[in-house]
Amino acid sequence: MTTLITGAAGFIGSRLAIRLLDAGETIVGIDNFDPYYDPAVKRSNIAAVERAAPTADAFALIEGDIRDSDQLYQVFKNHNITRVAHLAAMSGVRYSAEHGPLYAAVNVVGGANVLETARRHNVEIVVQGSTSNVYGETAHLPFSESDSAVEPLAPYPASKRAAELFAHSYHHLHGLNTTVLRFFNVYGPHGRPDMMPIRTLEAILKDQPIQAFGGGDLKRDWTYIDDILEGIIAALNKPLGFEILNLGCGFPISLLEFIHIYEKLIGKAATVETVPMPATEMPITYCDNSRAAELLGFAPKVNIEEGLARTWAWYQAEMLRR
């Protein structure tokens, strides 16, 4: 059994590769090392994956782009791919506001290339990463998969919602087993440097202001990386036909509460600067993970206090020594 991980150099992709390698699986990763954030971070992630590989044959890295359908076909053909964890994407809600065509090209066209190639090679399952941002400013709380999710607030969630619809069509027409996982605010050690958990930590350390949208009342349902990995692995191991499932902690907190936890951990006060809420931002993310619990046995274990403590411990051990 060989699992292809698209976006293997990213935060979630690299941690998933390490977990699967530790379980004795064979992994092929593909990544284009896009410069949206520092590619050196991604190179470091891949170095960690390579260290985790028990043999030279256990992990293969392909430097490539899911928009290149010919290259993608060769990857599937040459490596006998049996399962796919499709995590490659252009991320970043606010950045997407001015780069809509790029998000459509990577997340929709690239995603369709993955689905098309997977069905032509008769893979067992595609697990496709999506986002809680597809829900937009919904009145239904907590967020449930039954929500129509037809009013995304930016090109990033719009492109991810479109990719979900492509996945449904490939199951309907070709019988491709596809499970779409809507991730809720993933964080933890080795997290992306452009995301709030790392940016907030570094702002406190460097005495820089933290921008608090709408006075800090914005709430997010932070979900620890290990819990997300458990959900992805469970989905890879259990084809369900076609399903869309939320993966989230189910306990949203405000930005100000989030900052206060870090202040206590670091032992230093933050400087908070109130700024207007951008049009791209949802006031809250709030996960109903009952369906994932029913179908995958998903049960998040790490609360925000413990998760941020682990993130701070990792940062001190690995990042402050550089």
Image (spheres, rainbow, N blue to C red):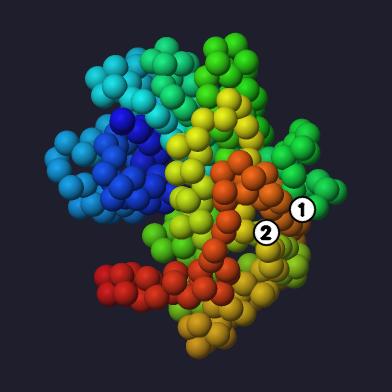
* Residue at the image position 69 percent from the left and 53 percent from the top: 287
From where the camera sits, is residue 209 visible? no
Is residue 208 shown above or below 14?
below
Mark 2 and mark 1 in contact? Answer it, CB < 8 Å: yes
Q: Which amino acid does label 1 sit on?
A: Pro
Per the image, label 2 sits on a secondary structure element best described as loop
Q: Which mark is residue 142?
A: 1
Rendered residue at 36%/76% (across/down): 316
Residue 79 visible within the image: yes
Q: Which residue bears the numbered disc 2?
A: 250
Depth order, front residue of 81/70: 81
Front residue (pair 104, 186):
186
**For residue 182, which quarter of the picture?**
top right
- Marks 2 and 1 sit apart, C-alpha to C-alpha, by 8 Å
Considering depth in this image, is 9 or 203 the residue closer to the camera? Answer: 9
Kind of element beneath mark 1:
loop
Q: Where is residue 12 in the image (x, y as percent from the top left)?
A: 44, 49
Please report whichever mark, 2 or 1, sits nearer to the chain's N-terminal start: 1
Query: Residue 176: x, y in percent?
Result: 52, 19
- Residue 24: give x, y in percent of width and height: 26, 44
Seen in the picture, residue 62 relative to 251 is either above or below; the reply is: above
Question: Few, some or many C-alpha atoms within 10 Å of disc 1 (few <14, some 14-19, many ≥20)?
Answer: some
Kind of residue at badge 2: Gly
- Report x, y in % for residue 142: 77, 53
Check the image and name the residue furthest to the right: 139
Report whether 151 appears left or right of 287: right
Q: Residue at x 64, y 35 (%)?
A: 244
